[in-house]
Image (cartoon, rainbow, N blue to C red):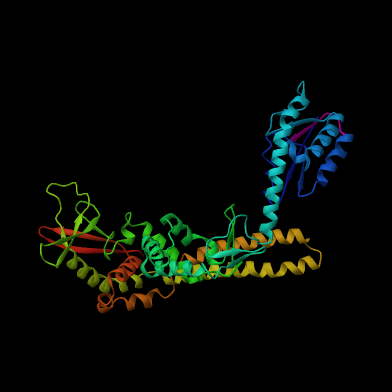
Amino acid sequence: MKIFAYAYSDPLLEASPDPTDWGWEVDRIYHDLGKRSQLEELITDCQTATAVYLLIRRLEELGDTVGEVSDRLSTLERMGVVIIATEQPYTSENANPRAELLKLLHAIQRQQRSRRIRQGHARSRLEALPPPGKAPYGYRRTKEKYTIDRSTSPVVKDFFENFLLYGSLRGAVRYLTKKYGKKISVTTGRRWLTNPVYRGHTAYQNGEIISNTHTPIISPEEAAQVDRLLRRNSRLPSRSASAPRSLAGLVVCSQCQSHMTVTRVTQRHQDKEYLYLRPISCPQLPKCGAVAYPEVLKHTIATVCRDLPLAVAGMNFPQLDAIKNSLGEAIARQQVILTQLPALVETGVLDAETAKLRAYKLRTEISVLQAKLATLPPVNLRSVAQAVSIPQFWWDLSEAERRFYFREFIREIQIIRQDKEWELQVNFIF
């Protein structure tokens, strides 16, 4: 008795199956990739062999239509081949295999229809065409790519610029409503900030991204800054990212480990206000007292000016440069291979469809490498640290601007209490 196995896979849709996954000791594996030449060879070999068991994952792998599947099943079974579908309830040794097949025909037809739709989408991906559906706000959809909509793209651009200036998602959403009357939810705003389309890339449902397919609304540098701001804001308590005060969400009481919120106190018939930082949920009795906000702000600025240059000087920049150089070299290698594909098609080494598939995989790999490169800190960090170590720089900023720069460098500010006195410990992000 011989045991054969047959597998069909479409390179546009799936990877080749693992030959060790059959669970049987197989004499020979026939595997077709896109075309079914191996299936014809299998049928020829079965004509001369006796007592053949044929393993197949799913019956629809035998053809592109229900008719082809049924004809090839009949051909093999007339030769005495016992067919076992490992992922479907079908075995030709059963008493009534045709009854089992009739039950499966509807599912086979549905699977093949789904496969044809996915093949169409996959061919569109190979051509870097936009996925099905409406174009994101700010773009119009043409046959081959997204093009900028001149009437709506300024709204999106202004939204990004406001977020980059103040680092507040909710603030940027409110800004759109106030200036343009464009009402979007915070969730929609977050989707805008992370949408690859606004960066000039095309994203597909399978999670793969092809870079530089159309004109972007924001530059690569702005996109990298947006990602850094989103990662920074994710570390803050809810709603603190849009709070008006620069220290909101950053200060923690080291004694009770509670985050501290900014409270405002006024006196009757007076315009003057007093700002304090107090613990949000202090479990101690008596509770930890409030601290004057202006004093914490003054000490924070002094600490940043003193300690930030030292913290940046302690970073391992040579290692960071090595990582950037490694990623840059990997991107350059992939781009060189990409430029060589047309020549390989002309010389007949690759056919056109294989070349398109290879180009698609190279472009998605380049996109992944570029995304990793964008997450690294900016190279001018030392010069920035020197510039912000001047106290007057901080005092000349508004509270919203100070909030932006504080969160760019500071992970947490701890208030360490000592009897009635206190001192600050500033923990930087790096």
Task: Identify which residue, 113 or 323, lies in the foreground.
Answer: 113
Residue at the spot 45% in from the left edge and 63% down from the top edge? 227
Name the quarter where the C terminus is drawn: bottom left
Name the quarter where the N terminus is drawn: top right
Residue 334 location, quadrant: bottom right
Q: Is residue 256 above or below residue 87?
A: below
Residue 50 part of the magenta-drawn span: yes
Left or right of 425? Residue 429 is: right
Q: Residue furthest front?
A: 181
Left or right of 24? Residue 289 is: left
Residue 319 appears in the rendering: no
Picture coordinates of residue 145 (x, y %)? 63, 64
Picture coordinates of residue 340 (x, y %)? 71, 69
Residue 113 part of the magenta-drawn span: no
Residue 189 appears in the rendering: yes
Residue 237 location, quadrant: bottom left
Left or right of 389? Residue 116 is: right
Q: Residue furthest top?
A: 95
Q: Residue furthest right?
A: 48
Residue at the spot 45% in from the left edge and 72% down from the top edge? 318
Task: Identify which residue, 209 or 398, lies in the foreground.
Answer: 398
Picture coordinates of residue 370 (x, y %)? 54, 65
Left or right of 196? Residue 40 is: right
Picture coordinates of residue 78 (x, y %)? 87, 29
Magenta stretch in the rendered image: 49-55
Residue at the spot 79% in from the left edge and 63% down from the top edge? 349
